[in-house]
Amino acid sequence: MSGAAEVRQAVGGLGRWVSELSWAEVPAEVRERLLVVLTDSIAVTALGSRDPAQRALVAAWDAPDGPSPLFGTGRAVAVDAAAWLNAVAAVRLELDDGHRLAAGHPAAHGFPAVLALAARRGVRGAELCCALLAAYEVAARFGRATRLRPGTHPHGNWGVPGAAAGCARLLGLGPAETAAAIDAGGGLPVAGPFSAALDGNPVRDAWVGAANQSGLAAARLAASGAGQVTGVAADALGGLLGELDPAVLTGGGWEVLGGYFKQHSSCSFTHAAIDAALSVREQVGPDPAEVLVEIHSLGAGLDRTSWPTPLAARFSLPFVVATALRRGRVGPAEFSAAALADPGTAELARRVVVRAAPDLDARLPAERPVRLTAAGIVAERPNPVGDAAFHPFSAADRVRVLGELLGAPEVVAGVRERCAALPDAVDAAAELRALGASCQVR
């Protein structure tokens, strides 16, 4: 069987699974986890909406009013605009949840599109939850199945089929049409260079907006009856962008249980190093003479000691390690213009040496380990705190961390309560409007 034929077969199975998914039959652990991921997604989107660059983008977009909330702004706009703008806000501060084995962010690639479309359509809460779960599971499977070429960023490519799957479920498509939507999503990837993130180019955030809009487009194509399942992802994600293993697309457990939540406002490859730096800070002080960061080769390229934008700083191990040592935290405030220009941080960052370590590479992908040495003190971390495999956050932990980041614990608690009640909602659109109103922050 050819690669395309295997993908066609796998996509057909995913189409059946998505269209037949029943919320009542989903294990309780999975249902609870999905709602925590949803809480996280809405809260970090609201937090991202406060960023000056995001506010400027919303103003420049000049989106028409519509049914779909822009979380954190108090506004509601047209479906496609909400899908794009919420997606960009969700990833802008590098606080959105992710999935280590998928090597990216399944929820950010599909939740904004699903939520925007659900605000337009009259569906029950349980149906919306099925659509969100489908978006996450399909995206994560494509992420695990795809090995991108070195230098390719995971935003905007393997996640599109997940957005398409979730939107197809909301549109009420049957197995064949849902498979066609997923297949079309597999043919709409962005070929984004990882260098854009290192350079601090905000087009990297726009790729996630494009993924959500492409998921909507793929589902609408299938709804029109014109979709065809050809296994296009075999040549798009595999071939052109890397390699695709169709066998990973089917079977396995619930992907949403294997994700991670963030507590630092930076690339996930830097988090274990930040955790290590924070652990030795009291022993070595805020300004050690030299810091050695040994890391797996996936993160070794994040070694730049200049950061023209906040995004570039979030992808600089020297900056975030120096910031953790000097300031004791790496949150959104640590990427202000004043923080980026701080000469003390720049001086310490120049003394942070980043080195790839073969023994740490050998522990991939089960771990993303880091070993940090400062003033003779060695701290090693197998994974970041918050990963499903290392000190995972409970629902209460995540609400606490989000409340601290947002500076409004009561807002996050309210979002959590509304998300927990969503499966029983008769009118999901009304609940989404209420969520949009309740998470406005200034």
Image (cartoon, rainbow, N blue to C red):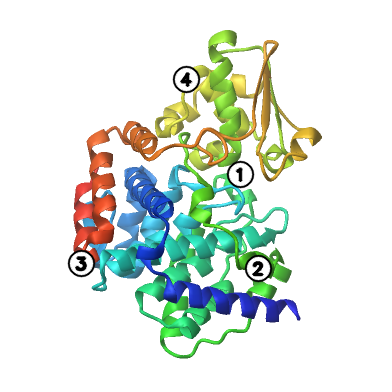
Q: Nearer the viewer, residue 237 or 229?
A: 229
Residue at (40%, 31%) from the top-left corner?
Answer: 333
Within 10 Å of disc 1 (Cα), the crowding (few <14, some 14-19, many 20+) is many
Of tags 3 and 4, the one toward the viewer is 3
Q: From the image, tell me which residue sits under label 4.
A: 327
- Amino acid of disc 2: Leu
- Which of marks 4 and 3 precedes in the sequence? 4
Residue at (78%, 40%) from the top-left corner?
Answer: 362
- Separation of residues labelled 2 and 1 (CA atoms): 23 Å
Tell me, for residue 198, which label it has, or none. 1
- Separation of residues labelled 4 and 2 (CA atoms): 41 Å
Left or right of 214 on screen, residue 253: right
Of tags 2 and 1, the one toward the viewer is 2
Q: From the image, tell me which residue sits under label 2.
A: 237
Tell me, for residue 257, which label it has, or none. none
Q: Are marks 3 and 1 in contact (CB under 8 Å)?
A: no
- Separation of residues labelled 3 and 1 (CA atoms): 43 Å
Of the 4 image quadrants, the one containing the C terminus is: top left
Q: Are marks 4 and 2 in contact (CB under 8 Å)?
A: no
Where residue 75 appears, x then y in whole percent? 22, 57
Where residue 348 appears, x then y in whole percent? 60, 19
Q: From the image, tell me which residue sits under label 3.
A: 427
Q: Nearer the viewer, residue 16 or 299?
A: 16
- Separation of residues labelled 4 and 1 (CA atoms): 23 Å
Q: Secondary structure at mark 2?
A: helix
- Amino acid of disc 1: Leu
